Every structure is written in C-alpha cells, then in structure tokens.
C-alpha cells in the first residue's frame, strides 16, 4: 500500500499548495484594493430650483427628502431662497424631494409635487438599471434582487476607485455579447445563476458587514478549509498505511 500512500501524499500536497497559493493571491489583491475602497457609499449632490411663491406673507421654504416616496426623514429650512444644493447624498440610492412654503405667521403649505432623483455620476449606463449585463441576462431582469445586490456592490466598492472603474469598463466592453448568448439559452442561464451565487453571497456580506469584515471572514473560512483537509488527509494516510 506504499504506492497508494505516496500517491495520496503527492495529491494532498498539490491540493494544499494550490489552496495556499489561492489564499496568498486573494490576500495580496485585497491588500491592494482595500485602501482604495471607501468604508461607505460614495457621496453625491444635487441642486434643486423652484419658482417663488408670490405673496407678501411668504417668509421662506422648507425642503423635505428621503429614500422612500412620500416618506421624508430629512427636512431643511432654506430661508427665502429659491434654490439649494444638497450634498452628502448616497450615490447608490434614489431620493425623493418635496418643498413647502411657510409664512411669517408660522403657517406651512402642503407639499409640492414630488421630485425623484438618482445619481447620474456613474458612467457607461451603470445607473439604476444599467450594467451587470451577464447577471441581468442570467436572471432575466435588472430589477431582480440578486442583480440589485451585484449592482449596489459595484456602485459602492468598484466605481469609487480607479482599479474598480477599469474592471467595470472592461466588463461593459466584453460582456454584452456573452450576455446575449446567455439570455437565449435556458440551460446556460441556470448554470450562470449557479456560478454567480458565491459572488452574490460575498457581495451581500460586504454590503451588510463592510468590505474589511467580509474579507477577514472569507480568509478565515479558506484557512479552516485547509486545516480540515489536512486532518482528513492525515486520517486517510494512516488508514492506507495500516492496510
């Protein structure tokens, strides 16, 4: 049984060596990307302009906004100005704005018509529905929850640094023909959906926990995998020697 033992030993060393190299490459890449990635979503801003209310008792205007239509969690008194620039917005979110006028007596009008705004700072059709061609083709819709996770990860962690932007640009240039092929074949769509699941899982964790904790957890899982394989191969080797 020594040949079998030697064969297992060589295969074990080869597998563990490859896993170790994978962890090294992965960790090195993350050391490069992490300093370039923000800890939160990128900041954006927008300017609102409206017609003045012509009335002698008008004292000023209030701006209300939030990320849900009709539900405004932020209010801003802009005084008697008819324009305002609002900064510090989350560029991956859609915002809804409405205005009111108030009088010198403290009376306030009803809300104006609501205005919807989404960041237009993302190039190459990477806005609310653009980009992520392969995932969109695999899941059939840009509004699919899994596609939204990938899109939000891209907006938050890739489009905010030069390395990520280059990667996204390459994806836009070369993935459209592949996406067209995937969209036409149900079997291929199913295979791609399965292959995207780990990426979606890591993206979801990064969005919920942050990129650094996700990287640490992923590296820990890979290290544990190596330890488990090492223990397993030792047991197999001992059984082969006894036989």
Image (spheres, rainbow, N blue to C red):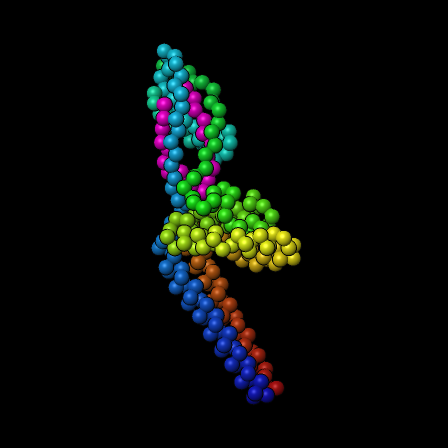
Q: Is residue 192 magenta?
A: no
Q: Is residue 74 above or below residue 207?
A: above
The percent coordinates of residue 147 (x first, y second) are 54, 48
Q: Is residue 24 visible?
A: yes
* Residue at the far right in the pictured view: 186
77 vs 98, nearest the viewer = 98
For the image, the number of numbered tags is: 0
The percent coordinates of residue 76 (x first, y second) are 38, 28
Q: Quadrant of the N terminus?
A: bottom right
Can you tell which quarter of the image residue 30 is in? bottom left
46 vs 229, nearest the viewer = 46
What residue is shown at x 45% (from left), y 42% (from top)? Answer: 92
118 vs 178, nearest the viewer = 178
151 vs 206, nearest the viewer = 151
The percent coordinates of residue 197 (x first, y second) are 56, 56
Q: Quadrant of the C terminus?
A: bottom right
Q: Which residues are magenta?
A: 82-101
**Dominant SS type (magenta):** strand
In the image, 87: left or right of 193?
left
What residue is shown at x 54% (from left), y 54% (from top)? Answer: 177
Q: Is residue 166 above or below residue 64?
A: below
What residue is shown at x 60% (from left), y 48% (from top)? Answer: 140
What residue is shown at x 37% (from left), y 51% (from top)? Answer: 161
* Residue at the far bottom in the pictured view: 2
């Amino acid at each position: 049984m020594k040949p079998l033992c030697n064969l297992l030993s060589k295969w074990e060393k080869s597998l563990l060596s490859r896993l170790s190299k994978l962890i090294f490459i992965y960790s090195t890449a993350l050391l490069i990307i992490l300093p370039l990635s923000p800890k939160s979503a990128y900041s954006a801003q927008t300017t609102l302009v409206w017609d003045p209310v012509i009335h002698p008792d008008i004292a000023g205007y209030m701006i209300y906004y939030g990320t849900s239509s009709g539900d405004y969690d932020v209010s801003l008194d802009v005084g008697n100005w008819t324009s305002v620039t609002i900064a510090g917005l989350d560029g991956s979110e859609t915002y809804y704005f409405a205005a009111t006028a108030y009088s010198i007596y403290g009376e306030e009008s009803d809300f104006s018509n609501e205005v919807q705004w989404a960041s237009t700072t993302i190039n190459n059709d990477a806005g609310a529905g653009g980009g992520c061609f392969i995932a969109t083709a695999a899941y059939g819709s840009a509004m699919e929850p899994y596609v939204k996770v990938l899109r939000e990860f891209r907006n938050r962690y890739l489009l905010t640094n030069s390395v990520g932007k280059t990667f996204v640009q390459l994806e836009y240039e070369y993935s459209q023909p592949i996406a067209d092929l995937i969209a036409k074949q149900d079997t291929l769509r199913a295979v791609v959906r399965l292959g995207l699941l780990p990426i979606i899982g890591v993206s979801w964790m990064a969005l919920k926990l942050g990129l650094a904790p996700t990287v640490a957890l992923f590296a820990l899982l890979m290290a544990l995998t190596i330890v488990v394989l090492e223990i397993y191969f030792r047991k197999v080797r001992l059984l082969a020697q006894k036989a």
